[in-house]
Amino acid sequence: MSRMTKAADYLQEHAEELARDIVHTVVPRFETHVPKEEAEAAVQMYTDFMGMLGEAISSGEEKLPAGLLKWSRENGERAADHGEKVSLIVSRYPQSRLVFVEKLTSISAKFELTTEETVFVNKQFNYMLDMSIQETVLAFEKVTDDIIKKARTEIMDLSAPVVPLKDGLAVLPLVGSINEQRARYLAEQAIPKIGEMRLERLIIDFSGIIQVDERVEQHLFDVYHILGLLGIKAIATGIRPDLAQKLVNMGADLSAIETYATVKQAMEQLK
């Protein structure tokens, strides 16, 4: 059995022991506190990584061991699901890399590897670590983006609640600021749902609006026209003088829309 094979077998057979030693050495070097459960999770990750490193070294070729990228993606996805910060994850790699290199150099000396063999071990380790970091961060960002997208959709749903008032009549209270993204959501997502409610009239209440982005006027009028095509009459309430003036300055023709000062006033007129 060659010295390289013996070293590779040692990494695989003593993976957990080596992982615990590395975690015990590196944790004090971090600037932030590492909870016990997080340290234990690191031991498990390093155990898996050390085993895969031993597998890669035993092959004698510079290649990624089977399962490394999948393992890295799962680590990134798990970190994102737990609400960790990618900056914290990445910031710990430099110290971890140094401790790994120190440990691998010691093992290389223990098995009397040649300089060339020691360089190969360290090259393989660094290649695997860099690819693992890349895959972990990409997976982390994808999950985080999905979480943010889902949260935005849920916020949009909450910010555009359609409240039935009586048969054929509902109110859509708008609150906060209307930017292009929110106006597009109203036109593309909220309106189709409204169309399924079999309404004859929809009161769109602007009394809770703080400001309107200058680029959204067309989207708001798209909502009005789409509702008309669905056979739903749109009625506007709560348009404050300052908001009305801003809409007019933006080129909006409010004369085509039935408006009332309040929802109550609109309902009294619609009896």
Image (tube, helix red, strand yellow):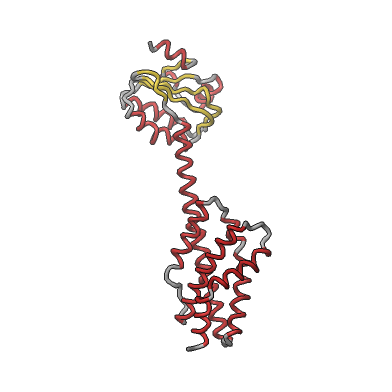
Residue 129 placed where, x, y %?
A: 53, 69
Q: How many marks?
A: 0
Determine whether 220 is above or below 5 in the image.
above
Residue 214 placed where, x, y %?
A: 51, 32
Q: Which residue is drawn at 41% across and 20% down?
A: 235
Q: Horizontal placement of 5 versus 110: left or right?
A: left
Q: Which residue is drawn at 44% across and 72% down?
A: 65
Q: Horizontal placement of 55 versus 97: left or right?
A: left
Determine whether 256 is above or below 188 in the image.
above
Q: Which of 143 and 51 is in front in this view?
A: 51
Q: Quadrant of the C terminus?
A: top left
Q: Which residue is drawn at 54% across and 75% down?
A: 14
Q: Which of 23 and 132 is in front in this view?
A: 23
Residue 154 placed where, x, y %?
A: 46, 38
Q: Nearer the viewer, residue 85 or 267?
A: 85
Q: Residue at x 54, y 67 (%)?
A: 46
Q: Horizontal placement of 33 versus 45: left or right?
A: right
Residue 177 placed where, x, y %?
A: 53, 31
